Amino acid sequence: MTEQNPPSQAAKNEKRSWFGRKKSVAEPEQHTSSATTEERATIEQGLEPSRSGFLSKLGQVFKGTFDLDDVLFDELEETLMTCDIGVHASLALVDRLRDRVEAEKIQDQRGVLLALRHEIAEMLAPSQRELNLTHSPTVILVVGVNGVGKTTTTAKLANQLKAQGNSVMLAAADTFRAAAVEQLQEWGGKLDIPVISQGSGADAAAVAHDALMAAKAKNCDVLLIDTAGRLHTQTDLMEQLQKVIRVIQKIDPDSPHEVIQVLDAGTGQNALSQLEHFQKAVNVSGLCLTKLDGSAKGGVAVSLSEKFKLPIHYVGVGEGVNDLRRFDANQFAAALIAAE
Ligand SMILES: Nc1nc2c(ncn2[C@@H]2O[C@H](COP(=O)(O)OP(=O)(O)O)[C@@H](O)[C@H]2O)c(=O)[nH]1
Ligand SMILES: [Mg+2]
């Protein structure tokens, strides 16, 4: 029961002109369900809006005469801040960049961009970590605020894990809205994955309890628990999440084995405060960053990684069930900074 790690190949396969758009992109084979025929977006495609944003802003920094002086580094710093990398991470990045430029005697724009790419990849590296699926069943609790893509990501992930040979079960613990249960059931039907539910208005903890009992009885490898969106100000809902955890811990004290917070990249720096709030209530173990395709704020991954050092297990690059990519630090940095 292991995840297959696709080689970080896409970055090598892409061809881009200097400050131009990519010409072609190829991504390594991924295991996907034969139940779906939808197109699969690559990280490069997903990060296109962010890359274009960087490109035009960096183009501004580099226009005119090219002097590797303090002015240029200051401008770079400001640019990174406006690209959702955040103040702290931008300062750290440019500090490292200066050192690298000096140590490697870099003198041209392309060299600076490649060095920046390298430093971003190093900053993202602590966030590259696979899900730990060694428990049986491995219980994955999916949390986050409303509309970030929890249910969709749960379905996408269930589909990938199933395609990799795991038996998977879903729990519809978003009992807040009737449509939420139906949404997960629909995915379950489409992907041929069992969904445990009790309808809307039911106790979320009771659904999670039943689901874990069922997953154990059926010797499932992975149980994914979808939950209702909530804000940190909704104390009752935050307590409900803690109750879900308490109840499943009565069955398996080590569960949930992963608590994945889903964050919408489009919210930019707001994603950091969302994570901070959830961390106070539950022990978030990893992240999924969704909707990269719909925003130019992909730089927020660097900010999140630098501040929290939590794994970013997956990124969402589209609405389709196959549009979930494993997070790869090098690939992400290469897709963010066009430098060829
Ligand atoms: N473009 C895009 N849309 C996404 C992605 N992930 C989720 N969505 C969409 O975001 C909307 C909300 O998703 P949903 O899973 O219901 O959010 P939840 O409230 O957190 O469960 C839906 O329309 C999804 O199709 C993504 O990676 N890219
Ligand atoms: Mg939902």
Image (cartoon, helix red, strand yellow):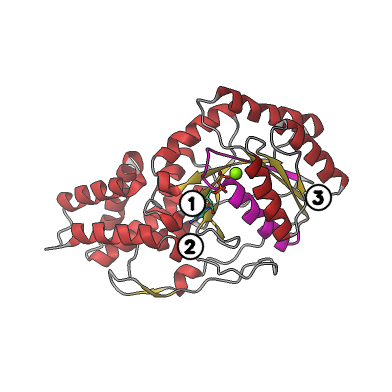
Marker disc for residue 79? none
Q: Which residue is mark 1?
A: 125
Horizontal and vertical percent position of residue 228 = 61, 37
Rounded to the nearest angstrom, the CA distance separating label 3 from label 2 is: 30 Å
Q: Quadrant of residue 92?
A: top left
Horizontal and vertical percent position of residue 71 = 15, 50
Instruction: Judge whether residue 7 is colored magenta.
Output: no
State which mark lies toward you, 1 or 2.
Answer: 2
Could you tell which of marks 1 and 2 lies nearer the N-terminus? Answer: 2
Q: Which residue is mark 2?
A: 43
Q: 33 or 260, which is in the foreground? A: 33
Left or right for 200, reference 17: right
Q: 83 or 135, which is in the foreground? A: 83
Q: Name the amino acid type tagged 2.
A: Ile
Is 68 placed above or below 74 here? below
Horizontal and vertical percent position of residue 272 = 44, 38
Secondary structure of residue under mark 3: loop
Q: Name the amino acid type tagged 3.
A: Cys
Q: Which residue is mark 3?
A: 220
Q: Name the amino acid type tagged 1.
A: Ala
Going 79% across and 40% down the picture, which residue do you hit? Answer: 212
Could you tell which of marks 3 and 2 lies nearer the N-terminus? Answer: 2
Rounded to the nearest angstrom, the CA distance separating label 1 from label 2 is: 16 Å
Q: Quadrant of residue 110?
A: bottom left
Q: Please tell me how crowded label 1 is: few (under 14), some (14-19), or many (20+) other residues with Cα within 10 Å.
A: many
